[in-house]
Amino acid sequence: MEARVTPRNRSTNSDFRGGVAPREYQRRFVAISVRALQQLSRCNVILPFLTATCRNPLGWVMNQYLSLVSLVVADYDEAITFFTRALNFELCEDTPLGGGKRWVVVRPPGRVGSGLLLARADGPAQAARIGDQTGGRVFLFLETDNFERDHARMTAAGVRFVQGPRHEPYGVVAVFEDLCGNRWDLIQPKSTHNYETRP
C-alpha cells in the first residue's frame, strides 16, 4: 500500500511527487535495484562500480567508484613504456589534447577498476612533485593473485624493489619504485594465497 500524505502533513511533503513519502521512495528504489542486480548476476554481468555508496539528501543509495588517479610524470612515452612493459599494464587511452598535452590512461591487466592518468608535469611546481607525490610514503597498492609470479617478472623487467617480500597478517607484500621514484606495494592479500600455511 502506498504511503499517501494526508492533508495534515501535506505542507511538509509537497515537494514529493504524488504525495509519496521519502521512505516509500527509498523502499521502491531499493526493491527495484535488488531485482535488477539479481537479473544481472544471472547473466554473469560484473558491476565494478558497485564499490562504494553514498546517500543523497533524500536518503537514496547511490553507487560511486574511483576511476582514475593522477600520476605526475616527466615524459608521456617514457611512462607508457615503463607501465606497459615493466608492470604489464594496458594502455587504455592516449588522446592528444593540443599544445603537446595528452590524455594517457593505463590500467592493470585482467581487472576493471581504477586506472592511472599519466599527467606530464606542467611547470616547476608540478615537476618538483615527480616521484614524491606522498612525501616518501607508499603511494599506490598493486594487488595480485600470484605474488611470486609478478615479483619474478617485475624483477626480470628491471623494476627496483626497495624492500623484499615479507609476510604480514594481511598477506605477502614487497615495496617497489616506479620509474619516477614513487613507492608502491605489490601485495597478494591473504585471502587469495596459501602463504598462511607456511611458517
Image (cartoon, rainbow, N blue to C red):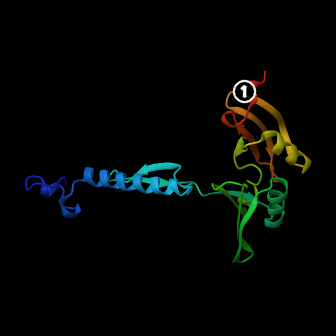
Residue 172: quadrant of the picture: top right
Which residue is more in the foreground, 70 or 64?
Answer: 64
For the point 19% across and 56% down, the residue is 13
Please tell me how crowded label 1 is: few (under 14), some (14-19), or many (20+) other residues with Cα within 10 Å: some
Residue 197: quadrant of the picture: top right
Q: Amino acid at mark 1?
A: Glu
> Is residue 190 among what the camera can see?
yes
Please indicate whether residue 43 sits to the left or right of residue 183 in the image: left
Which residue is more in the foreground, 62 or 32?
Answer: 32
- Considering every residue shown, the one lying at the far left of the view is 7
Above-or-below relation of 55 to 196: below
What percent of the width, then of the height, locates residue 80?
80, 63
The residue that label 1 is drawn on is 196
> Is residue 121 among what the camera can see?
no
Above-or-below relation of 97 to 107: below
For the point 35% across and 52% down, the residue is 31
For the point 53% across and 58% down, the residue is 43
* SS for callout 1: helix
